[in-house]
Every structure is written in structure tokens, then in C-alpha cells.
Image (cartoon, rainbow, N blue to C red):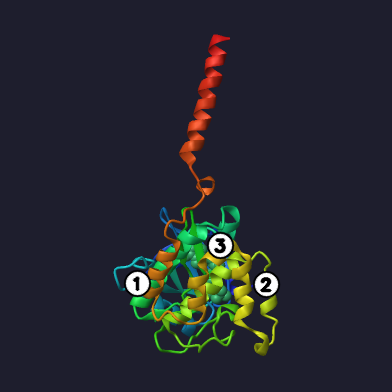
Amino acid sequence: MTTWYDEAFRPGAVIKGKWNGHVYVVERLLGAGSNGIVALVRRGNARFALKAGYETVDHQSEINSLLAISMKENSFKNFLIDSDDMMIQGKGISFYVMRYIEGVTLSEFIHKRSQDWIYVIGTNLLRKLTEIHRSGYVFGDLKVENMIVSNYGDVDLIDFGGVSPKGRAIKQLTEVYDRGFWNMGERVAEESYDLFSFAILLLKTLDHRKRFAGFIKTLPQNRELDQLTSIMRENPVAAQLAPFLNKALRGEFNTSEEAIVEWKKLIAGKKVAQSTLKMPWLKICFAASIFICGATIYMYW
Ligand SMILES: Nc1ncnc2c1ncn2[C@@H]1O[C@H](COP(=O)(O)OP(=O)(O)OP(=O)(O)O)[C@@H](O)[C@H]1O
């Protein structure tokens, strides 16, 4: 069965905003989730990610949250490019256009490079959370799938469907990242809610035994913090981060500003292994030296 988006999001399809009149050409689909469908689009020479929502009310609330956190002078400024409606089969579908972020998931990044990168990525992610918290909001649905990591451990958050004003109920969550699931606190939009998910995200990424798939199936009365602390005992990087992770899991940080200070103290002096840093210039020099050597041999032979 074909759906409205198969036609609207096929490569080469043209999407025209009803109100702002901007024209986008679809390059390819980037992904589809429970709230909407995201495509890589082109306007002139620029590339963007365009997200069309399944439910107008939820979609509008996602745009409002994104607008609210991008009001301040922070890294979310200019993330939202356009928001409009498109007409498909006589029906109005709302969409918004955002910066296109090239990168990979945190798990892929750590797998390709090394676990040491968690120190850099953790700092960058805490900075992002701090920016959102300063705007009076909480991210809500922090998880591996909702962030993109690029070259030097830069972090971008995507999917703002869970962003809630502080003090309100959490509106979108993913079980194992949710402190309510672990009986460790309420589902209220507090900075400590995001910091709990932050700790889970790091533990899930560092856990070689992939225990989280099993945690989902456990009965509520059997979910214990000890299941999480066992990961810290087994993984050397998680063990180093344990003082921070324990505090975040127990809700002992009131603010992300407080958390980032502690994080920085803990990771001071930790470096990313040189072998995992990409150094294109080194490869270029190496290739050039081989070429010069080859050319010299050829000329004097
Ligand atoms: N700005 C962006 N740049 C690049 N890729 C993006 C961007 N935004 C979203 N994507 C891709 O599209 C996919 C789906 O986006 P998104 O998570 O926003 O959808 P969703 O319906 O809200 O998902 P979920 O079911 O997790 O709530 C993402 O996993 C990501 O691969």
C-alpha cells in the first residue's frame, strides 16, 4: 500500500510551501519515526532536512519548542529554517525545515573510533542540554537515536518532539532512558530528568554485553539501580565516570550547570587516543612522500 509520503518524498519530488512559497527538491529519505518523516532536500545549492508530521497538533508543538529554545544566543539559533504546509492530495500537511546534520549515531562513532571519545562527546552533549535548560525547557526524550555525532565529537540533537517547559509532565519518553521506568523519580520536566537519561545513554553506549534489550523485559519490581552500577564495575571507562554517573542516576544534580562542572573535573587530563583521531594531512603527506620516492627512482633508473 502506498502512503501520501511515498509520492511526496520520492527523489526528485518538489515540495512547495503554501504560505512562505519556498520550493524544496527531495534528494532522499533520511528516516521515519513515530512522529514524522524526514527527507534530505535541496533549495538552490543548500541542503536541509525537512520533517513532515503525521499529527498536526504534535508537529506544531515540536516547532513551538524548537522556536522557544532557538530564541536565545545559542547553538540552536538558525537551526529552524522554515515552517509551512504542503498540499498533498488536497490535504494540508505541516512540515518544518532544519539544518541538515551529517554524522553517525553515538554507538557507531564509538564503535569506529574508541570509547575514549565519550569524554569529548559527553562534554558537548552536556553543553547542549545546558543551553536548552537555560531557555526554560527540558529535552525529555534523550536517547542514542535523537543525536548525531560528527567528525571531532561534535554533537547535534534532533527530534524536538519531547521538549517540554520546565515543571510540566514529560510528554515523550523511551522506556530505558526514563527515570520513572527505573523507579528513580517522577516524569516531570526537570533538569535532573535529562541528566538521568544522559547517564543511561553513556552506560548503554559503553555496555559491551548489550544488557539494555533485556532490561525492557524486566518486571517493574525487579528493576534496580544495581543492574546499572554493574556496568560501571565491568567497563573501565564507565568505572572512571562512576562518581558522575551515580549522582546523575540518583538525581543528585539539580542543574546541568552543576553537572558540567563536576563532569569537567572528572575528565580533566583524559585524552582521546591519537590513533583514533583522523589526520587527513598525515595521510596526504604519506601519499606524497611515496609518490616523490617513486618518481625519483623512476627518473634515475
Ligand atoms: N536535522 C537532521 N539532519 C539529518 N538527519 C536527520 C535530521 N533530523 C532527523 N534526521 C533523520 O531522520 C530520522 C527520523 O527523525 P526524527 O527522530 O525526528 O523522527 P521521529 O518521528 O520524531 O522519531 P521517533 O520515533 O524517534 O520519535 C532520524 O533518526 C535521523 O536519521
Q: Nearer the viewer, residue 63 or 181?
A: 181
Q: Position of residue 132 (x, y in %)?
A: 38, 74
Using the rendered image of the protein, determine whether residue 100 is visible from the camera's viewpoint: no
Q: Are marks 2 and 3 in contact (CB under 8 Å)?
A: no
| Residue 214 placement: quadrant | bottom right
User: How far apart in space, not on screen, are marks 2 and 1 (Cα)?
Assistant: 36 Å
SS at badge 1: loop
The quarter of the picture where the C terminus appears is top right
Q: Position of residue 202 (x, y in %)?
A: 54, 68
Q: Residue at x 57, y 66 (%)?
A: 31
Count of numbered labels shown in the rendering: 3
Q: Earlier in the sequence, mark 2 or mark 1?
A: 1
Q: Residues within 10 Å of mark 3 (few under 14, many from 20)?
A: some
Q: Residues within 10 Å of mark 1 (few under 14, many from 20)?
A: some
User: How far apart in space, not on screen, are marks 1 and 3 (Cα)?
Assistant: 34 Å
Residue 87 appears left or right of 260: right
| Residue 125 placement: quadrant | bottom left
- Residue type indicated by callout 1: Ser
Q: Earlier in the sequence, mark 2 or mark 3?
A: 2
The quarter of the picture where the N terminus appears is bottom right
Foreground mark, 2 or 1? 2
**What residue would you read off at disc 3?**
237
Using the rendered image of the protein, determine whether residue 151 is visible from the camera's viewpoint: yes
| Residue 258 placement: quadrant | bottom left
**What residue would you read off at disc 2?**
211
In the image, farthest residue toward the top: 301
**What residue would you read off at disc 1?**
70
- Residue type indicated by callout 2: Arg
Q: Residue at x 46, y 59 (%)?
A: 120
User: How far apart in space, not on screen, are marks 2 and 3 (Cα)?
Assistant: 17 Å
Q: Position of residue 11 (x, y in %)?
A: 56, 59
Residue 170 appears left or right of 208: left
